[in-house]
């Protein structure tokens, strides 16, 4: 009996202590798809945020307090995304958000950001609309499809592309990427053949690939996530489609492709916003290595390195803004974000103004890399 | 429930925004309320005519898109040379259009789909919702497809010089409550009318109903029109609250939500969808707050579904009613009526 | 011309797998009248079994298929006994909701255990395809096609030539008379569900290595299975077989010549058209509506 009493007292004291302690944290809201169609990627990003959280707290936190990530699952669904943002802002009173992974999810929550006047750091979405809609609460560290296409431009001649076909998913991500790349290619004198779409959940592309084969281009640009990319490569090989495949969008996890597509992946090209196979070429190699080492130490799936860093960088950006603002308040943080300079895995992160005057959003200009798979390994391209 | 009870409950609900200051809870209440309106409309079809439609979310979504497009304005080619345009209209016009258009679609579906029954009807309704989703996804010129229609305006009403805007949560709560009460009254009236009794006869024994001269198809079509129109209005409300709509609104999981609300609450009772709606509207939020992995939250949700359906197959409201009735024992035994009394 | 032939070949190969998906469901949905939302999950379960057996445990690829089927049958029997046992006389929507609940539980359990990352199963087939003139087909898909045909034939024989099959058909034609004749109704229900589930698991075990294994893989498969069942007529194994090929043809040609975005809509459009104009499906026997 006495022991139970002492235990209860200890627990009570402990809970009072921790709850009082807990009030000393600065909260950062994270909304990611942890279940549903995009669960794999969302979980990687969340893992990246957790690594950053621990690193920052070990180094003493910010403004004398520790940071606390509140990670909500938006279930890969725009309505849920709105709910998570409502909860994070209304209930948890977070002064800054990170999210929401896909362009559709991010666009869905943008009106809420304006309504509640809380800034959000966009870590993955690629649709141009996000930073051109006149929403001053959006700060994106990931590149737009337009930027990615522009970075690819010098390689068009080097690779000798004469006629290109497209295969992309039927959503913001794929359609935006297809539109930007085809525009860039046309501006550089390349003929565009067929532009095929696919449902993000489809697993059989035999019809689309047969059409692409009949089109006769020399290069196929594919924009989708890694699962479909693996299947496309395998099925292209089955149909004897002998074109050069270039995958765009940065959600293509080349390691996973090598592991799962095997010989079918040989000779393919992939854009990446972070090349974990040779981190020394990134703008901030020490940051990249630090992130990678911690990721591997925690035993996370190596295939997720190419996505987790987005969450990692986003947390560092949020913390830099909080520090510069001097207080954990949404408006102060929003203004401070304009002035941050963070050495991240994405490169040197800073925000430039984009969108209608007076209501600009912030856009970072990260580096874009192109890798190829040769002899079963991811390698630098010779271009 | 008697009329007094109904108005007392409405009055009580109307006070909610006054003492619930947590806007997040209010948000959950509003979304739940909108789904309850849709569930009530599904109940009309499922509970009173006995036909299980798994495509109900199609009406909800069509209403949402209609209202969004009317209030945003659109221009689309219906043939290579012919373009149809509409300038942005006030939101209340959008909601009205949503009701009318979904009602029409309901009419068409009613006429066509009710050639089949039972398991076949389930599948046809499911397929209909899927096809509508795929149209919304692919007819990009009209619906923006997966890029979604955003910046949808909120409802504003002008009287003379005074303007009432339903942007903030408390106002929207009242709007939702108003529409919900209206729908309830409409459905209650319909169910207690001659047409309603025809529907119930149809549910209980279709061939017998036909043999006494009830026009089965007409009853079904009427039920479908009203059911669809109410669902359409619910969808329009939803879209002017969330202010963004994309093809995901047609996802099967929303139909599941509505069906669960109706069946667990008690199909064929007016209060059923409300009870079921409150439970299954708030359960996901409660689970979200429980700090367990998202997958585990879903698993608990699934278990809860199965448990309620298993142990209370008629639903919660009929089960509660049975308990109350047995308590009043002899007093009621003489006057206790058959299912006719159920439709309160 | 080469493109058309490739489309046709793709359709034939795909048709075999759709047929396999369909016959499992036509037994459950068609004969038992259970709107079986767990069919897709049994499909995914079969695929995950393959993955678990072949990859970490290193079992033989071909033996793993049989094991996956057996496990699928057991899981199906379990579901039937535990969940459906008390609901045999219940409304269609009650059973349906229970099945939906089971579907939610199964899919999220899979994600909990395996995480959402797509998994690949190693196959013993060469990666170079078999080339026939302007067409080519992978060995893996050819294997799937052959096994699917064998399973379809086996099921047809089971339903039409064995005592169990006779008992099944009797039970669902007239339950009370069958019971009077001494047939154990409960056992028949369980056996039917188990067989249907084993076929779904087989489809998953066959297709998992061809595509990828992910928790949501069952959803689309289930949708197509329903389309196939409706096309062929509820309860008809030959109907489901032909239905599978028709669906595959409609998808391939529709995606190839009309629009690839609407590919998966083909199945649903077909369902609606068939149900509106020939509600009993292409092959079913006389069927009382309702």
Image (tube, coloured by chain):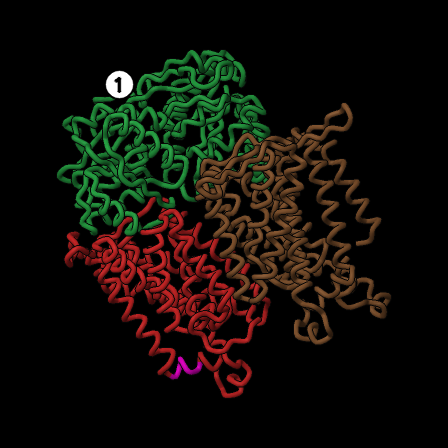
Chain colours: A green, B brown, C red
Q: Nearer the viewer, residue A58 or B13?
A: B13
Q: Is A378 placed above or below B128 here?
A: above
Residue C257 x/y as whole percent: 33, 51
Tag 1 subunit: A
Residue A244 x/y as whole percent: 19, 38
Residue C140 x/y as whole percent: 22, 58
Q: Is A23 placed above or below B305 here?
A: above
User: What element does badge 1 sit on?
Assistant: loop
Quadrant in the picture for the C terminus of chain B? bottom right
Span highlighted in magenta in the image: C163-167
Quadrant in the picture for the N terminus of chain B? bottom right
Q: Is residue B277 left or right of residue B124?
A: right
Query: Can you see residue C219?
Result: no
Q: Residues within 10 Å of mark 1 (few under 14, many from 20)?
A: some
Rendered image quadrant of residue C14: bottom left
Q: Is B110 placed above or below B141 here?
A: below
Rendered image quadrant of residue B211: bottom right
Query: Can you see residue B103?
Result: yes
Q: Is residue A36 left or right of residue A282?
A: right
Q: Residue at x 61, y 59 (%)?
A: B110
Q: Nearer the viewer, residue C239 or B92?
A: B92
Which residue has dot 1 on it? Answer: A283
Residue C33 x/y as whole percent: 51, 69
Q: Nearer the viewer, residue B126 or B40?
A: B126
Q: Is residue A296 left or right of residue C165?
A: left
Q: Is A53 placed above or below B142 here?
A: above
Quick check: is C255 in the magenta stretch?
Answer: no
Q: Is residue B95 left or right of residue A6?
A: right
Q: Residue at x 56, y 41 (%)?
A: B65
Q: Nearer the viewer, residue C138 or B4?
A: C138
């Amino acid at each position: 009996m006495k022991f139970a009493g002492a235990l209860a007292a200890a627990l009570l004291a402990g809970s009072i202590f921790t709850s009082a302690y807990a009030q000393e944290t600065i909260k950062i809201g994270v909304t990611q798809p942890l279940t549903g169609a995009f669960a794999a990627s969302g979980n990687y990003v969340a893992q990246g945020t957790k690594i950053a959280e621990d690193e920052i707290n070990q180094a003493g936190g910010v403004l004398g307090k520790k940071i606390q990530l509140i990670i909500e699952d938006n279930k890969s669904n725009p309505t849920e995304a709105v709910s998570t943002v409502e909860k994070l802002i209304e209930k948890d009173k977070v002064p800054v958000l990170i999210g929401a992974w896909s362009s559709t999810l991010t666009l869905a929550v943008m009106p809420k950001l304006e309504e509640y006047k809380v800034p959000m750091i966009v870590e993955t979405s690629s649709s141009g609309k996000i930073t051109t809609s006149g929403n001053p609460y959006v700060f994106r560290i990931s590149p737009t499809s337009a930027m990615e296409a522009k970075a690819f431009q010098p390689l068009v001649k080097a690779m000798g592309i004469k006629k290109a076909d497209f295969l992309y998913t039927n959503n913001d991500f794929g359609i935006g990427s297809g539109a930007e790349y085809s525009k860039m290619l046309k501006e550089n004198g390349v003929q565009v053949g067929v532009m095929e779409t696919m449902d993000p959940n489809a697993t059989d592309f035999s019809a689309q690939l047969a059409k692409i084969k009949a089109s006769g281009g020399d290069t196929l640009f594919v924009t989708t996530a890694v699962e479909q990319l693996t299947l496309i490569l395998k099925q292209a090989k089955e149909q004897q489609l002998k074109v050069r495949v270039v995958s765009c969008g940065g959600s293509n996890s080349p390691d996973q492709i090598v592991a799962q597509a095997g010989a079918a992946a040989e000779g393919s090209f992939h854009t990446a916003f972070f090349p974990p196979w040779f981190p020394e070429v990134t703008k901030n190699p020490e940051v990249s290595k630090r992130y990678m080492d911690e990721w591997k130490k925690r035993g996370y799936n190596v295939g997720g390195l190419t996505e987790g860093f987005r969450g990692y960088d986003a947390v560092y950006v949020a913390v830099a803004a909080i520090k510069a603002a001097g207080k954990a308040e949404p408006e102060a943080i929003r203004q401070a974000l304009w002035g941050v300079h963070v050495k991240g895995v994405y490169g040197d992160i800073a925000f430039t103004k984009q969108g209608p005057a007076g209501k600009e959003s912030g856009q970072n200009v990260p580096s874009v890399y192109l890798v190829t798979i040769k002899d079963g390994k991811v390698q630098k391209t010779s271009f | 429930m008697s009329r007094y009870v109904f108005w007392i409950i409405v009055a009580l609900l109307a006070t909610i925004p006054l003492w619930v200051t947590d806007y997040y809870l209010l948000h959950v209440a509003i979304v739940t309320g909108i789904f309850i309106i849709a569930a009530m409309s599904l109940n009309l079809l499922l509970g009173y005519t006995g036909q299980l439609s798994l495509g109900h979310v199609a009406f909800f979504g069509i209403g949402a898109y209609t209202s969004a497009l009317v209030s945003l304005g659109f221009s689309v080619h219906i043939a290579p040379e012919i373009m149809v345009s509409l300038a942005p209209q006030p939101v209340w016009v959008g909601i009205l259009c949503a009701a009318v258009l979904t009602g029409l679609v309901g009419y068409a579906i009613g006429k066509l789909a009710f050639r089949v029954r039972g398991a076949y009807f389930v599948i046809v309704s499911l397929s209909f919702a899927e096809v509508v989703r795929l149209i919304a996804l692919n007819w990009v010129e009209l619906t923006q497809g997966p890029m979604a229609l955003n910046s949808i305006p909120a409802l504003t009403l002008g009287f003379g010089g005074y303007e009432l805007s339903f942007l903030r949560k408390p106002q929207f709560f009242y709007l939702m409550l108003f529409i919900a009460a209206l729908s309830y009254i409409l459905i209650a009236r319909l169910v207690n009318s001659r047409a309603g009794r025809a529907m119930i006869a149809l549910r209980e024994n279709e061939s017998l109903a036909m043999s006494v001269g009830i026009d089965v198809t007409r009853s079904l079509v009427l039920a479908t029109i009203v059911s669809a129109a109410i669902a359409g209005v619910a969808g329009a409300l939803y879209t002017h609250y969330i202010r963004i709509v994309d093809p995901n609104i047609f996802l099967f999981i929303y139909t599941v939500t509505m069906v669960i609300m109706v069946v667990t609450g008690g199909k064929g009772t007016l209060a059923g969808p409300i009870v079921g709606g409150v439970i299954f509207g708030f359960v996901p939020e409660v689970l979200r707050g429980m700090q367990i992995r998202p997958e585990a939250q879903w698993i608990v949700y699934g278990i809860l579904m199965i448990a309620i359906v298993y142990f209370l197959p008629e639903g919660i409201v009929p089960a509660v009613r049975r308990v109350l009735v047995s308590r009043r024992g002899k007093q009621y035994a003489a006057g206790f009526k058959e299912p006719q009394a159920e439709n309160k | 011309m080469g493109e058309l032939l490739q489309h046709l070949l793709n359709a034939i190969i795909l048709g075999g797998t759709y047929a396999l998906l369909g016959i499992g469901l036509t037994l459950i949905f068609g004969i038992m009248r259970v709107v079986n939302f767990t069919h897709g999950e049994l499909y995914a379960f079969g695929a995950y079994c393959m993955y678990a057996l072949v990859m970490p445990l290193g079992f033989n690829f071909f033996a793993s298929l049989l094991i996956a089927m057996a496990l699928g049958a057991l899981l199906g029997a379990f579901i039937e006994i535990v969940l459906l046992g008390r609901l045999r006389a219940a409304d269609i929507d009650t059973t349906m909701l229970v099945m939906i609940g089971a579907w939610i539980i199964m899919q999220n359990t899979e994600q909990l255990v395996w995480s959402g990352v797509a998994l690949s199963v190693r196959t013993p087939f060469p990666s170079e395809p078999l080339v026939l003139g302007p067409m080519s087909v992978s060995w893996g898909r050819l294997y799937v096609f052959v096994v699917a045909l064998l399973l379809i034939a086996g099921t047809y024989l089971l339903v039409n030539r064995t005592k169990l099959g006779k008992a099944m058909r009797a039970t669902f034609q007239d339950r009370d008379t069958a019971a009077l004749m001494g047939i154990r109704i409960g056992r028949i229900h369980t056996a039917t569900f188990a067989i249907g589930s084993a076929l779904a698991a087989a489809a998953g075990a066959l297709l998992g290595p061809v595509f990828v294994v992910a928790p949501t893989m069952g959803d689309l498969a289930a949708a197509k299975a329903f389309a196939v069942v409706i096309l062929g007529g509820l309860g008809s194994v030959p109907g489901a077989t032909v239905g599978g090929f028709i669906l595959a043809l409609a998808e391939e040609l529709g995606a190839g010549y009309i629009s690839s975005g609407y590919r998966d809509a083909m199945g649903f459009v077909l369902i609606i058209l068939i149900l509106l104009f020939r509600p009993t499906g292409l092959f079913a026997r006389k069927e009382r509506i309702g």
